[in-house]
Amino acid sequence: MLLRLINTTAFRISLVYALVFSLISTGAISFIYWNSAKEIRAQTDSQLSAETNALLSLYNNGKINALTQEMNQLNTDGRSKFFLYALLNREQRDLIEEIAPEKRAMLPGDNFFATVPLNTVITAPDSQKKQFTQPARVLLTLLPDGYQMLVGTDLFERQALLARILNVIITLIVLMFTLAMAGGAMLGYGVLHRINSVRKTAGEIIDGDLSQRMQVTTKNDEFDRLSTVLNTMLSRIEQLMQSMHQVTDNLAHDLRNPLNRLRNRLEVSLIENLDKESCQQVQQEAIQDIDDIIRTFNALLSIAQAESGKHDHDWVLIDTRKFIDELAELYSIVAEESQINFTCDIKGNAFILGDHQLLAQTLTNLLDNAVKFTPPNGTISLNAMHNKKQFIIEVADSGTGIPEDKREVVFERFTRLDSARSTPGNGLGLSLVKAVVERHSGTIELLDNKPGLKVRLTFNAAGKPLSGKKNGAA
Protein backbone atom coordinates (compact mmCIF):
# COMPACT_ATOMS: atom_id res chain seq x y z
CA MET A 1 0.00 0.00 0.00
CA LEU A 2 2.86 2.39 0.90
CA LEU A 3 4.63 1.66 -2.40
CA ARG A 4 1.42 2.29 -4.36
CA LEU A 5 0.92 5.52 -2.42
CA ILE A 6 4.44 6.70 -3.25
CA ASN A 7 3.85 5.86 -6.93
CA THR A 8 0.75 8.08 -7.16
CA THR A 9 1.08 11.25 -9.20
CA ALA A 10 -0.56 13.27 -6.43
CA PHE A 11 2.07 12.19 -3.89
CA ARG A 12 4.91 12.91 -6.30
CA ILE A 13 3.53 16.35 -7.10
CA SER A 14 3.12 17.02 -3.38
CA LEU A 15 6.72 15.88 -2.77
CA VAL A 16 8.04 18.20 -5.47
CA TYR A 17 5.86 21.01 -4.14
CA ALA A 18 7.16 20.36 -0.59
CA LEU A 19 10.77 20.44 -1.77
CA VAL A 20 10.30 23.59 -3.84
CA PHE A 21 8.33 25.30 -1.08
CA SER A 22 10.93 24.30 1.52
CA LEU A 23 13.77 25.60 -0.66
CA ILE A 24 11.99 28.89 -1.26
CA SER A 25 11.14 29.19 2.44
CA THR A 26 14.72 28.33 3.41
CA GLY A 27 16.04 31.00 1.05
CA ALA A 28 13.57 33.61 2.31
CA ILE A 29 14.15 32.85 6.00
CA SER A 30 17.93 32.65 5.47
CA PHE A 31 17.80 36.11 3.93
CA ILE A 32 15.87 37.36 6.95
CA TYR A 33 18.43 35.74 9.28
CA TRP A 34 21.37 37.19 7.36
CA ASN A 35 19.74 40.62 7.28
CA SER A 36 18.99 40.43 11.00
CA ALA A 37 22.61 39.51 11.79
CA LYS A 38 23.79 42.36 9.58
CA GLU A 39 21.44 44.81 11.33
CA ILE A 40 22.58 43.67 14.79
CA ARG A 41 26.21 44.16 13.77
CA ALA A 42 25.42 47.60 12.34
CA GLN A 43 23.72 48.64 15.59
CA THR A 44 26.69 47.35 17.58
CA ASP A 45 29.13 49.27 15.39
CA SER A 46 26.97 52.37 15.70
CA GLN A 47 27.02 52.14 19.51
CA LEU A 48 30.80 51.62 19.53
CA SER A 49 31.26 54.63 17.21
CA ALA A 50 29.08 56.83 19.42
CA GLU A 51 30.98 55.82 22.57
CA THR A 52 34.31 56.34 20.82
CA ASN A 53 33.29 59.79 19.56
CA ALA A 54 32.31 60.82 23.08
CA LEU A 55 35.69 59.76 24.40
CA LEU A 56 37.50 61.49 21.51
CA SER A 57 35.72 64.75 22.35
CA LEU A 58 36.99 64.48 25.90
CA TYR A 59 40.46 63.64 24.62
CA ASN A 60 40.49 66.66 22.33
CA ASN A 61 39.61 68.92 25.27
CA GLY A 62 41.87 67.50 27.96
CA LYS A 63 44.29 65.31 26.11
CA ILE A 64 45.49 62.00 27.45
CA ASN A 65 45.20 62.75 31.17
CA ALA A 66 41.52 63.60 30.96
CA LEU A 67 40.90 60.53 28.80
CA THR A 68 42.74 58.28 31.26
CA GLN A 69 40.75 59.65 34.18
CA GLU A 70 37.44 59.20 32.34
CA MET A 71 38.18 55.60 31.28
CA ASN A 72 39.16 54.70 34.85
CA GLN A 73 35.86 56.15 35.99
CA LEU A 74 33.96 54.22 33.27
CA ASN A 75 35.48 50.94 34.35
CA THR A 76 34.07 51.47 37.84
CA ASP A 77 30.45 52.44 36.97
CA GLY A 78 27.60 50.59 35.23
CA ARG A 79 28.59 51.40 31.67
CA SER A 80 31.49 49.00 31.88
CA LYS A 81 28.92 46.18 31.91
CA PHE A 82 28.13 46.97 28.28
CA PHE A 83 31.45 48.31 26.98
CA LEU A 84 35.09 47.37 27.31
CA TYR A 85 37.63 50.21 27.52
CA ALA A 86 41.37 50.15 27.01
CA LEU A 87 44.02 52.86 26.54
CA LEU A 88 47.39 51.42 25.53
CA ASN A 89 50.74 52.85 24.58
CA ARG A 90 51.80 51.39 21.27
CA GLU A 91 55.36 51.02 22.50
CA GLN A 92 54.22 48.73 25.28
CA ARG A 93 51.55 46.78 23.30
CA ASP A 94 50.45 47.20 19.73
CA LEU A 95 46.96 45.70 19.11
CA ILE A 96 47.30 46.29 15.39
CA GLU A 97 49.89 43.56 15.23
CA GLU A 98 47.82 41.21 17.40
CA ILE A 99 44.67 41.43 15.23
CA ALA A 100 44.94 39.65 11.87
CA PRO A 101 44.36 41.87 8.82
CA GLU A 102 41.53 39.66 7.51
CA LYS A 103 39.53 40.37 10.67
CA ARG A 104 39.70 44.14 10.28
CA ALA A 105 37.04 46.45 8.80
CA MET A 106 39.19 49.46 8.03
CA LEU A 107 38.09 53.05 8.66
CA PRO A 108 39.79 56.36 7.79
CA GLY A 109 43.04 57.05 9.72
CA ASP A 110 44.02 53.41 10.11
CA ASN A 111 41.16 52.91 12.56
CA PHE A 112 39.15 49.69 12.20
CA PHE A 113 36.41 47.47 13.54
CA ALA A 114 37.23 43.84 14.32
CA THR A 115 35.55 40.78 15.82
CA VAL A 116 38.03 38.94 18.02
CA PRO A 117 37.94 36.60 21.01
CA LEU A 118 37.40 38.45 24.25
CA ASN A 119 40.70 37.22 25.70
CA THR A 120 42.50 39.05 22.90
CA VAL A 121 41.80 42.38 24.56
CA ILE A 122 41.33 41.21 28.17
CA THR A 123 43.93 39.33 30.16
CA ALA A 124 42.07 36.55 31.95
CA PRO A 125 43.27 34.27 34.74
CA ASP A 126 44.23 30.75 33.68
CA SER A 127 41.25 29.28 35.54
CA GLN A 128 38.79 31.47 33.60
CA LYS A 129 40.30 31.47 30.12
CA LYS A 130 37.47 29.35 28.68
CA GLN A 131 34.91 31.94 29.83
CA PHE A 132 36.71 34.64 27.85
CA THR A 133 36.81 32.86 24.50
CA GLN A 134 33.46 34.28 23.32
CA PRO A 135 33.71 36.86 20.55
CA ALA A 136 33.80 40.60 21.12
CA ARG A 137 33.34 43.49 18.74
CA VAL A 138 35.95 46.22 19.11
CA LEU A 139 36.71 49.62 17.58
CA LEU A 140 40.41 50.51 17.66
CA THR A 141 41.29 54.20 17.29
CA LEU A 142 44.85 55.50 16.91
CA LEU A 143 45.58 58.69 18.91
CA PRO A 144 48.20 61.24 17.75
CA ASP A 145 50.49 60.86 20.75
CA GLY A 146 51.23 57.15 20.28
CA TYR A 147 48.32 55.76 22.19
CA GLN A 148 45.60 53.31 21.07
CA MET A 149 42.06 53.62 22.38
CA LEU A 150 39.91 50.49 22.25
CA VAL A 151 36.18 50.42 22.85
CA GLY A 152 34.52 47.00 22.63
CA THR A 153 31.45 45.06 23.65
CA ASP A 154 30.73 41.42 24.36
CA LEU A 155 28.76 39.67 21.53
CA PHE A 156 27.69 36.67 23.58
CA GLU A 157 24.06 37.76 24.11
CA ARG A 158 23.69 38.93 20.52
CA GLN A 159 25.04 35.68 19.11
CA ALA A 160 22.87 33.71 21.52
CA LEU A 161 19.86 35.60 20.13
CA LEU A 162 20.91 34.80 16.56
CA ALA A 163 21.41 31.16 17.52
CA ARG A 164 17.88 31.00 18.94
CA ILE A 165 16.54 32.60 15.76
CA LEU A 166 18.46 30.07 13.68
CA ASN A 167 17.04 27.17 15.73
CA VAL A 168 13.52 28.51 15.24
CA ILE A 169 14.15 28.83 11.49
CA ILE A 170 15.39 25.25 11.22
CA THR A 171 12.44 24.00 13.25
CA LEU A 172 10.01 25.88 11.01
CA ILE A 173 11.61 24.53 7.83
CA VAL A 174 11.49 20.94 9.13
CA LEU A 175 7.90 21.41 10.29
CA MET A 176 6.82 22.88 6.93
CA PHE A 177 8.47 20.06 5.01
CA THR A 178 6.93 17.43 7.31
CA LEU A 179 3.45 18.96 6.99
CA ALA A 180 3.84 19.20 3.22
CA MET A 181 4.83 15.53 3.07
CA ALA A 182 1.91 14.57 5.32
CA GLY A 183 -0.45 16.61 3.15
CA GLY A 184 0.95 14.95 0.04
CA ALA A 185 0.44 11.53 1.61
CA MET A 186 -3.16 12.36 2.52
CA LEU A 187 -3.81 13.74 -0.96
CA GLY A 188 -2.20 10.71 -2.57
CA TYR A 189 -4.24 8.38 -0.38
CA GLY A 190 -7.45 10.18 -1.36
CA VAL A 191 -6.59 9.92 -5.06
CA LEU A 192 -5.61 6.27 -4.65
CA HIS A 193 -8.90 5.55 -2.90
CA ARG A 194 -10.89 7.14 -5.75
CA ILE A 195 -8.86 5.28 -8.37
CA ASN A 196 -9.35 1.98 -6.52
CA SER A 197 -13.10 2.63 -6.53
CA VAL A 198 -13.05 3.23 -10.29
CA ARG A 199 -10.88 0.16 -10.86
CA LYS A 200 -13.16 -2.02 -8.76
CA THR A 201 -16.26 -0.83 -10.62
CA ALA A 202 -14.51 -1.31 -13.97
CA GLY A 203 -13.57 -4.87 -12.96
CA GLU A 204 -17.21 -5.69 -12.15
CA ILE A 205 -18.28 -4.25 -15.50
CA ILE A 206 -15.62 -6.33 -17.28
CA ASP A 207 -17.01 -9.40 -15.50
CA GLY A 208 -20.36 -8.71 -17.16
CA ASP A 209 -22.32 -6.57 -14.68
CA LEU A 210 -23.19 -3.62 -16.92
CA SER A 211 -25.47 -2.11 -14.25
CA GLN A 212 -22.48 -0.94 -12.17
CA ARG A 213 -21.67 2.78 -12.16
CA MET A 214 -18.76 4.91 -11.01
CA GLN A 215 -19.14 6.53 -7.60
CA VAL A 216 -20.05 10.23 -7.72
CA THR A 217 -19.63 12.31 -4.55
CA THR A 218 -20.89 15.78 -3.66
CA LYS A 219 -17.44 17.35 -4.14
CA ASN A 220 -18.02 17.95 -7.87
CA ASP A 221 -14.28 17.71 -8.49
CA GLU A 222 -12.54 16.40 -11.63
CA PHE A 223 -13.06 12.79 -10.52
CA ASP A 224 -16.80 13.38 -10.13
CA ARG A 225 -17.04 15.04 -13.53
CA LEU A 226 -15.07 12.18 -15.10
CA SER A 227 -17.26 9.62 -13.30
CA THR A 228 -20.38 11.39 -14.57
CA VAL A 229 -19.13 11.19 -18.16
CA LEU A 230 -18.17 7.54 -17.72
CA ASN A 231 -21.56 6.74 -16.19
CA THR A 232 -23.27 8.36 -19.16
CA MET A 233 -21.11 6.30 -21.51
CA LEU A 234 -21.84 3.12 -19.53
CA SER A 235 -25.56 3.84 -19.59
CA ARG A 236 -25.39 4.25 -23.34
CA ILE A 237 -23.41 1.01 -23.71
CA GLU A 238 -25.88 -0.84 -21.50
CA GLN A 239 -28.75 0.58 -23.53
CA LEU A 240 -27.11 -0.48 -26.78
CA MET A 241 -26.40 -3.95 -25.43
CA GLN A 242 -29.99 -4.34 -24.25
CA SER A 243 -31.19 -3.03 -27.59
CA MET A 244 -28.95 -5.50 -29.40
CA HIS A 245 -30.29 -8.40 -27.31
CA GLN A 246 -33.83 -7.19 -27.87
CA VAL A 247 -33.28 -6.83 -31.60
CA THR A 248 -31.74 -10.29 -31.76
CA ASP A 249 -34.65 -11.83 -29.86
CA ASN A 250 -37.26 -9.95 -31.85
CA LEU A 251 -35.54 -10.69 -35.13
CA ALA A 252 -35.43 -14.39 -34.32
CA HIS A 253 -39.09 -14.30 -33.30
CA ASP A 254 -40.26 -12.32 -36.35
CA LEU A 255 -38.27 -14.38 -38.85
CA ARG A 256 -39.28 -17.72 -37.38
CA ASN A 257 -42.86 -17.56 -38.69
CA PRO A 258 -42.08 -16.64 -42.33
CA LEU A 259 -39.20 -19.13 -42.44
CA ASN A 260 -41.43 -21.88 -41.01
CA ARG A 261 -44.15 -21.04 -43.53
CA LEU A 262 -41.60 -21.03 -46.33
CA ARG A 263 -40.24 -24.41 -45.27
CA ASN A 264 -43.71 -25.93 -44.91
CA ARG A 265 -44.75 -24.73 -48.37
CA LEU A 266 -41.62 -26.10 -49.98
CA GLU A 267 -42.05 -29.37 -48.11
CA VAL A 268 -45.67 -29.66 -49.26
CA SER A 269 -44.63 -28.97 -52.84
CA LEU A 270 -42.19 -31.91 -52.62
CA ILE A 271 -44.60 -34.37 -50.98
CA GLU A 272 -47.80 -33.61 -52.84
CA ASN A 273 -48.23 -33.95 -56.56
CA LEU A 274 -49.34 -30.38 -57.32
CA ASP A 275 -50.65 -29.21 -60.61
CA LYS A 276 -49.08 -26.24 -62.34
CA GLU A 277 -51.51 -23.69 -60.91
CA SER A 278 -51.07 -24.95 -57.33
CA CYS A 279 -47.30 -25.05 -57.75
CA GLN A 280 -47.30 -21.44 -58.94
CA GLN A 281 -49.46 -20.50 -55.95
CA VAL A 282 -46.94 -22.09 -53.58
CA GLN A 283 -44.07 -20.33 -55.32
CA GLN A 284 -45.88 -16.99 -55.16
CA GLU A 285 -46.50 -17.38 -51.42
CA ALA A 286 -42.86 -18.41 -50.88
CA ILE A 287 -41.71 -15.32 -52.75
CA GLN A 288 -43.98 -13.21 -50.56
CA ASP A 289 -42.41 -14.69 -47.42
CA ILE A 290 -38.93 -14.05 -48.81
CA ASP A 291 -39.91 -10.46 -49.66
CA ASP A 292 -41.07 -9.97 -46.05
CA ILE A 293 -37.71 -11.23 -44.80
CA ILE A 294 -35.83 -9.00 -47.23
CA ARG A 295 -37.91 -5.98 -46.17
CA THR A 296 -37.05 -6.67 -42.53
CA PHE A 297 -33.33 -6.83 -43.27
CA ASN A 298 -33.49 -3.76 -45.50
CA ALA A 299 -35.20 -1.84 -42.71
CA LEU A 300 -32.51 -2.92 -40.24
CA LEU A 301 -29.78 -1.92 -42.69
CA SER A 302 -31.44 1.47 -43.22
CA ILE A 303 -31.60 2.05 -39.46
CA ALA A 304 -27.94 1.06 -39.10
CA GLN A 305 -27.02 3.37 -41.98
CA ALA A 306 -28.92 6.26 -40.40
CA GLU A 307 -27.37 5.72 -36.97
CA SER A 308 -23.81 5.26 -38.23
CA GLY A 309 -23.68 8.40 -40.35
CA LYS A 310 -21.35 6.71 -42.85
CA HIS A 311 -22.87 8.55 -45.81
CA ASP A 312 -22.99 12.03 -44.27
CA HIS A 313 -20.52 13.20 -46.92
CA ASP A 314 -23.17 12.45 -49.57
CA TRP A 315 -25.67 14.91 -48.07
CA VAL A 316 -27.16 17.51 -50.38
CA LEU A 317 -29.29 20.62 -50.05
CA ILE A 318 -32.89 19.53 -50.57
CA ASP A 319 -35.55 21.88 -51.92
CA THR A 320 -38.33 21.09 -49.44
CA ARG A 321 -41.21 22.45 -51.57
CA LYS A 322 -40.35 20.32 -54.57
CA PHE A 323 -39.52 17.36 -52.31
CA ILE A 324 -42.90 17.42 -50.53
CA ASP A 325 -44.89 18.27 -53.65
CA GLU A 326 -43.72 15.09 -55.38
CA LEU A 327 -44.53 12.95 -52.32
CA ALA A 328 -47.94 14.60 -52.02
CA GLU A 329 -48.69 13.91 -55.68
CA LEU A 330 -47.79 10.24 -55.23
CA TYR A 331 -49.82 9.69 -52.05
CA SER A 332 -52.83 11.62 -53.21
CA ILE A 333 -53.34 8.81 -55.74
CA VAL A 334 -52.78 6.13 -53.05
CA ALA A 335 -55.25 7.84 -50.71
CA GLU A 336 -57.83 8.18 -53.47
CA GLU A 337 -57.64 4.46 -54.15
CA SER A 338 -58.27 3.82 -50.44
CA GLN A 339 -61.17 6.32 -50.39
CA ILE A 340 -59.28 8.67 -48.08
CA ASN A 341 -59.31 12.46 -48.35
CA PHE A 342 -55.75 13.74 -48.79
CA THR A 343 -54.64 17.39 -48.46
CA CYS A 344 -51.25 19.07 -48.71
CA ASP A 345 -50.37 22.59 -47.50
CA ILE A 346 -46.85 24.06 -47.85
CA LYS A 347 -46.17 27.50 -46.35
CA GLY A 348 -42.87 29.09 -47.31
CA ASN A 349 -39.85 27.38 -48.73
CA ALA A 350 -36.57 26.25 -47.21
CA PHE A 351 -33.60 24.02 -47.89
CA ILE A 352 -32.41 21.32 -45.54
CA LEU A 353 -29.09 19.52 -45.70
CA GLY A 354 -29.40 15.76 -45.56
CA ASP A 355 -29.55 12.35 -47.14
CA HIS A 356 -32.21 12.54 -49.83
CA GLN A 357 -32.96 8.82 -49.90
CA LEU A 358 -33.29 8.40 -46.13
CA LEU A 359 -35.51 11.48 -45.78
CA ALA A 360 -37.73 10.25 -48.59
CA GLN A 361 -37.97 6.84 -46.93
CA THR A 362 -38.85 8.53 -43.63
CA LEU A 363 -41.80 10.47 -45.03
CA THR A 364 -42.86 7.43 -47.06
CA ASN A 365 -43.04 5.35 -43.87
CA LEU A 366 -45.14 7.98 -42.13
CA LEU A 367 -47.53 8.33 -45.09
CA ASP A 368 -47.76 4.53 -45.46
CA ASN A 369 -48.74 4.25 -41.77
CA ALA A 370 -51.30 7.03 -42.19
CA VAL A 371 -52.89 5.26 -45.16
CA LYS A 372 -52.74 1.89 -43.37
CA PHE A 373 -54.51 3.02 -40.18
CA THR A 374 -56.96 5.58 -41.59
CA PRO A 375 -60.42 4.15 -42.35
CA PRO A 376 -62.30 4.93 -45.59
CA ASN A 377 -63.70 8.46 -45.76
CA GLY A 378 -61.02 9.52 -43.28
CA THR A 379 -58.53 12.33 -43.84
CA ILE A 380 -54.75 12.59 -44.19
CA SER A 381 -52.92 15.92 -44.29
CA LEU A 382 -49.33 16.66 -45.18
CA ASN A 383 -48.32 20.13 -43.99
CA ALA A 384 -45.00 21.96 -44.11
CA MET A 385 -44.01 25.37 -42.81
CA HIS A 386 -40.86 27.45 -42.50
CA ASN A 387 -40.62 28.88 -38.96
CA LYS A 388 -37.66 31.25 -38.60
CA LYS A 389 -34.62 28.94 -38.74
CA GLN A 390 -36.62 25.73 -38.57
CA PHE A 391 -38.51 23.68 -41.10
CA ILE A 392 -41.48 21.70 -39.77
CA ILE A 393 -43.25 18.80 -41.47
CA GLU A 394 -46.52 17.38 -40.10
CA VAL A 395 -48.26 14.20 -41.16
CA ALA A 396 -51.74 13.94 -39.59
CA ASP A 397 -54.49 11.35 -39.99
CA SER A 398 -57.89 10.53 -38.53
CA GLY A 399 -57.09 6.88 -37.83
CA THR A 400 -56.82 4.91 -34.61
CA GLY A 401 -53.92 6.93 -33.23
CA ILE A 402 -51.41 5.87 -30.56
CA PRO A 403 -52.17 5.99 -26.81
CA GLU A 404 -50.14 8.60 -24.95
CA ASP A 405 -48.41 6.02 -22.74
CA LYS A 406 -47.21 4.11 -25.84
CA ARG A 407 -45.76 7.02 -27.80
CA GLU A 408 -42.18 6.35 -26.70
CA VAL A 409 -42.46 2.57 -26.87
CA VAL A 410 -43.38 2.54 -30.56
CA PHE A 411 -39.92 3.84 -31.47
CA GLU A 412 -38.32 0.62 -30.24
CA ARG A 413 -37.47 -1.92 -32.90
CA PHE A 414 -40.00 -4.67 -33.69
CA THR A 415 -42.58 -3.00 -31.45
CA ARG A 416 -46.15 -3.41 -32.70
CA LEU A 417 -49.26 -2.34 -30.80
CA ASP A 418 -52.29 -4.59 -30.48
CA SER A 419 -54.20 -2.52 -33.04
CA ALA A 420 -51.47 -3.23 -35.64
CA ARG A 421 -51.20 -6.98 -35.18
CA SER A 422 -53.63 -7.70 -38.00
CA THR A 423 -51.84 -5.43 -40.50
CA PRO A 424 -48.69 -6.32 -42.42
CA GLY A 425 -45.43 -4.90 -41.09
CA ASN A 426 -42.35 -5.66 -39.03
CA GLY A 427 -42.39 -2.92 -36.38
CA LEU A 428 -39.32 -1.12 -37.77
CA GLY A 429 -40.94 1.83 -39.55
CA LEU A 430 -40.99 4.33 -36.68
CA SER A 431 -37.57 3.12 -35.47
CA LEU A 432 -36.18 4.06 -38.87
CA VAL A 433 -38.01 7.40 -38.82
CA LYS A 434 -36.52 8.32 -35.43
CA ALA A 435 -33.01 7.21 -36.44
CA VAL A 436 -33.10 9.30 -39.63
CA VAL A 437 -34.52 12.38 -37.90
CA GLU A 438 -31.93 12.26 -35.11
CA ARG A 439 -29.12 11.75 -37.65
CA HIS A 440 -30.28 15.01 -39.26
CA SER A 441 -30.23 16.76 -35.85
CA GLY A 442 -34.01 16.98 -35.89
CA THR A 443 -36.76 16.10 -33.46
CA ILE A 444 -39.88 13.95 -33.76
CA GLU A 445 -43.11 14.34 -31.78
CA LEU A 446 -46.21 12.17 -31.68
CA LEU A 447 -49.29 14.28 -30.93
CA ASP A 448 -53.01 13.67 -30.57
CA ASN A 449 -54.91 14.74 -33.71
CA LYS A 450 -58.35 14.25 -32.09
CA PRO A 451 -59.03 11.77 -33.60
CA GLY A 452 -55.96 10.10 -35.02
CA LEU A 453 -52.27 10.82 -34.84
CA LYS A 454 -50.13 13.81 -35.78
CA VAL A 455 -46.42 13.30 -36.37
CA ARG A 456 -44.33 16.47 -36.28
CA LEU A 457 -40.76 16.54 -37.65
CA THR A 458 -38.56 19.58 -36.99
CA PHE A 459 -35.32 20.25 -38.87
CA ASN A 460 -32.82 23.09 -39.00
CA ALA A 461 -33.21 25.06 -42.23
CA ALA A 462 -30.02 25.50 -44.26
CA GLY A 463 -31.10 28.59 -46.22
CA LYS A 464 -30.91 28.94 -49.98
CA PRO A 465 -28.43 26.76 -51.89
CA LEU A 466 -25.13 28.35 -52.77
CA SER A 467 -23.76 28.38 -56.29
CA GLY A 468 -22.01 25.13 -57.14
CA LYS A 469 -23.71 23.15 -54.34
CA LYS A 470 -25.51 19.90 -55.08
CA ASN A 471 -29.24 20.15 -54.86
CA GLY A 472 -31.67 17.24 -54.48
CA ALA A 473 -35.39 16.65 -54.77
CA ALA A 474 -37.67 13.63 -54.46
Image (cartoon, rainbow, N blue to C red):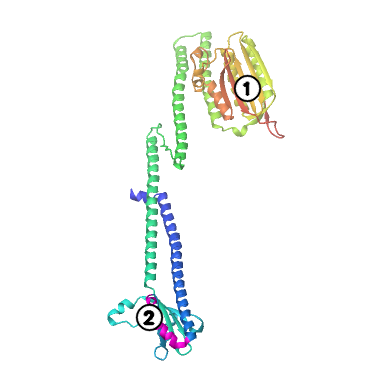
Q: Quick one: quadrant of the C terminus? A: top right
Question: Which residue occupies the extreme bottom position in the image?
Answer: 91
Residue depicted at x 40% and y 38%: 202
Which residue is at a point 38% across and 40% down the rendered structure image? Answer: 197
Q: Residue at x 47, y 37 (%)?
A: 229
The kind of secondary structure the magenta stretch mainly shows is helix
Give how far apart the Cα atoms at labels 1 and 2 are.
114 Å
Give the residue type that dot 1 points to: Ile
Relative to 42, residue 10 above or below: above
Q: Position of residue 388 (x, y in %)?
A: 66, 28
- The front one of 90 and 382 is 90
Residue 190 horizontal/vertical position (percent): 39, 45
Q: Which mark is residue 149?
A: none
Q: Which residue is found at the position 42% from the left and 52% from the top?
A: 14
The span shown in magenta is 62-81
Mark on residue 393?
1
Residue matched to label 2: 75
